[in-house]
Image (cartoon, rainbow, N blue to C red):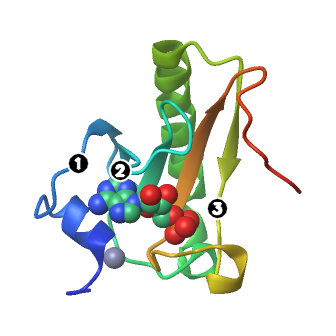
Amino acid sequence: MDDCIFCKIVAGEIPSEKVLESENFIVVKDAFPKLNGHSLVISKKHYDSFLDMPSELYEELLKTSKEATLKIVKEVGAEGFNLVVNNGRVAGQIVPHVHWHILPRKKDDGFEFGV
Ligand code: AMP
Ligand code: ZN
């Protein structure tokens, strides 16, 4: 996708702070972090949302997310974390290229997350 900022990050055309990489995913720090260590698990191939991503990638997605979360939680000294995927504008998805947020949490961090 020519106009997609996450495709450009994957291609190295936009700078990013890489946390780690697997065969089909890249994990980078969010450029506008809502919390210390806020990172994004981005599929290397463009899929608009979670529902467009093939299920064959689920295991690698979870393994990559776990590995990145362990690294980030240790790095920032978090006590817990949220894994979040926004799907569709109405659900807060701004970038239409599937990605998971890793949100490291600390007691009294002031972050409001309602489910
Ligand atoms: P969402 O609202 O779920 O689509 O999340 C998109 C996320 O991408 C937001 O948290 C943004 O701060 C983040 N973001 C936007 N541009 C960049 C960029 N160039 N590099 C890294 N993260 C970005
Ligand atoms: Zn894309």
Judge depth for marks 2 and 1 and give the one in front.
2
Q: Residue furthest right?
A: 115
Q: Earlier in the sequence, mark 2 or mark 1?
A: 1
Q: Earlier in the sequence, mark 3 or mark 1?
A: 1
* Residue 28 relative to residue 91: left or right: left
Q: Name the residue: 56% across, 21% down.
A: 73
Q: Quadrant of the N terminus?
A: bottom left
- The structure residue drawn at horizontal position 44% and vertical position 75%, both measured from the top left corner, is 97
Image quarter where the C terminus lies is bottom right
Q: How many marks?
A: 3
Q: Secondary structure at mark 2?
A: loop
- Does the Cβ of the disc 3 residue fall within 8 Å of ligand 1? yes
- In the rendered image, which residue does mark 1 sit on? 16
On the image, the x and y values in percent for residue 66 come to: 57, 33
Looking at the image, which residue is at 56% across and 37% down? 35
Query: Could you classify mark 3 by the number of other residues whose Cα lies within 10 Å: few (under 14), some (14-19), or many (20 or more)?
Result: some
Of circles 3 and 2, which is in front? 2
For marks 2 and 1, give the CA distance.
8 Å
- Asked whether mark 2 lies closer than 8 Å to ligand 1, one says yes
Residue identifier under label 3: 85
Q: Where's residue 31, x and y in %?
A: 35, 50
- For badge 1, the amino acid type reads Ser
Q: Is residue 92 left or right of residue 75?
A: right
Please tell me whether residue 26 is drawn above or below residue 78 in the rendered image: below
For ligand 1, give the image quadrant: bottom left
Disc 3 vs disc 1: which is toward the camera?
1
Amino acid at pointer 3: Val
The residue carrying mark 1 has its beta carbon less than 8 Å from ligand 1: yes
Name the residue tied to disc 2.
31
